[in-house]
Image (tube, grey):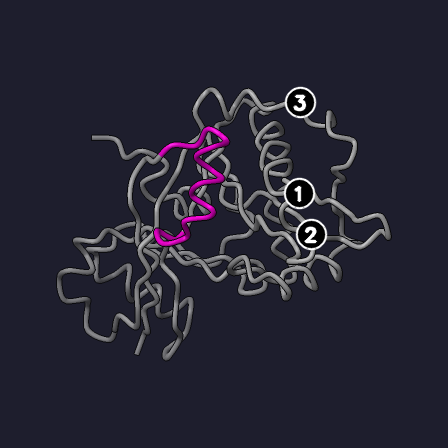
Amino acid sequence: MTQHPLDEPVWASLTGAHRHLAEGGDLARRYPPDVSPFHALADPRDEGAWEQLREVAGAGAQVLLPGLDGAVLDAPLPAGARLVRELPGVQLVATPAAAGAPAAGADPGVVVLGEQDVPEVLDLVERTQPGPFGPRTPLLGTYLGVRDDDGRLVAMAGERMRPPGFTEISAVCTDPAARGRGLASRLVRAVAAGVVARGETPFLHALADNAGALRLYGALGFRLRRTVLFPLVELR
């Protein structure tokens, strides 16, 4: 049976739209560390894939393997691999309601963020902690933001993984002082509109216990596809 692109979205991205960023080989790949901490295996049941992952990441490295099959984690990991922790999460996919967001550019308060905005983006990330984000994460796709009246960047959202036919919306964050104004909703809709304009379907990941984010995404028309795990594994 053919695997769905969202079953292993990191691997599907690193062998597809993001292959120009991939480090590794045919069995294990990762993003450059300053782009994303995500790693992936072609087949997590293949000990050779774990060996290649160790070569790519280095002995002693701790690697994030989003979406790793829970059955793999339930069984003993290969020698030299140790589960440090795992966080339960969910994978959400846009319904036609979410895909029917206003066209990109329809919201004049939303601006495209570029290379010149990276210092402000990183400052906002530091203030809001939306999840893994590095200096070159914006290479993964389009990032949009909202600025306050004084020109300060107070909210953003962007694109991360790109398995075939899909784009993940990520780094959705709002400065605490600007919350309650619907900025996250505006940005998710704007990013989704750009994804749909390319003929792709937006999707999201969130921690399973992030009730606020799940309410927001549900209201915007995203629905649960599956539960996922975000395991951190040490390679010894």
Specify the quadrant of the image occupied by residue 39.
bottom left
* Dots 1, 2 in contact, CB < 8 A: yes
Of marks 3 and 1, which one's residue comes earlier in the chain? 3
Q: Which residue lies furthest to the right in this view?
A: 150
Q: Which residue, given by chain and number where applicable, does mark 3 sit on?
A: 103
Region rendered in magenta: 207-223
Q: In this view, does 24 lie to the left or right of 27?
A: right
Question: At label 3, which amino acid type do we have?
Answer: Ala
Secondary element at image label 1 = loop
Image coordinates of residue 46 in percent, x first then y, are: 21, 56
The percent coordinates of residue 220 (x first, y second) are 50, 31
Camera-side mark, 3 or 2: 2
User: Which secondary structure lies at badge 3?
Assistant: loop
Give the SS element for disc 2: helix
Q: Of the numbered discs in the image, which one, if any, rests on residue 178?
A: 2
Q: Name the residue under label 1.
A: 181
Q: Which of 43 and 64 is in front in this view?
A: 64
Q: Is residue 3 left or right of residue 31?
A: left
Amino acid on which the number 2 mark rests in the picture:
Ala
The residue lying at 80 percent from left, 55 percent from top is: 152
Dot 2: few (<14), some (14–19), or many (≥20) neighbours within 10 Å? few
Residue sticking out furthest to the front: 180
Asked if the residues shown at circle 3 and circle 1 are in contact, with their CB atoms under 8 angstroms apart, the answer is no
Q: Nearer the viewer, residue 167 or 193?
A: 193
Mark 3 touching mark 2, by CB under 8 A?
A: no
Q: How much space separates mark 3 and mark 1, taking CA atoms?
A: 20 Å
Residues at marks 1 and 2, CA–CA distance in whole angstroms:
7 Å
* Vertical position of residue 115 compared to residue 75: above or below: above
Q: Position of residue 2 (x, y in %)?
A: 25, 31
Q: Where is residue 200 in the image (x, y as percent from the top left)?
A: 51, 26
Q: Which amino acid does label 1 sit on?
A: Arg
The residue shown at (51%, 59%) is 131
